[in-house]
Amino acid sequence: MTKEESIVTVLYGSETGTAQDTAEEIWKAAK
């Protein structure tokens, strides 16, 4: 099995910062 390179874009909108926290968790999990 070969390793493929992928690009993932995580977009978020937030007034309170909670969406940013969630986006960062998604980014970390995708790494």
Image (cartoon, rainbow, N blue to C red):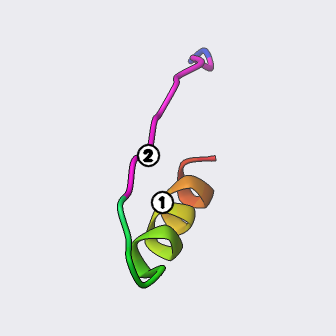
Task: Tell me if residue 21 comes above or below residue 4 in the rendering.
Answer: below
Q: Circle 2 is placed at which residue position?
A: 10
The picture quadrant where one finds residue 5 is top right
Instruction: Check residue 9 for magenta coloring.
Output: yes
Instruction: Check residue 10 for magenta coloring.
Output: yes
Residue 12 in the image: state x and y as whole percent: 38, 56
Residue 13 in the image: state x and y as whole percent: 35, 61
Which residue is situated farthest in the front direction here?
15
Q: Residues within 10 Å of mark 1 (few under 14, many from 20)?
A: few
**Amino acid bearing label 1:** Ile
Which label's residue is closer to the chain start, 1 or 2?
A: 2
Task: Tell me if residue 16 comes above or below residue 12 in the rendering.
Answer: below
Q: Which mark is residue 16?
A: none
The picture quadrant where one finds residue 25 is bottom right
Q: Residues within 10 Å of mark 2 (few under 14, many from 20)?
A: few
Q: Which residues are magenta?
A: 3-12
Task: Tell me if residue 18 comes above or below residue 27 in the rendering.
Answer: below
Question: Which label lies toward us, 1 or 2?
Answer: 2
| Residue drawn where x is 42% and y is 84% of the image | 16
> SS for tag 1?
helix
Residue 4 in the image: state x and y as whole percent: 57, 17
Residue 29 in the image: state x and y as whole percent: 55, 58
**Amino acid bearing label 2:** Val
Q: Circle 1 is placed at which residue position?
A: 26
Q: Nearer the viewer, residue 13 or 10?
A: 13
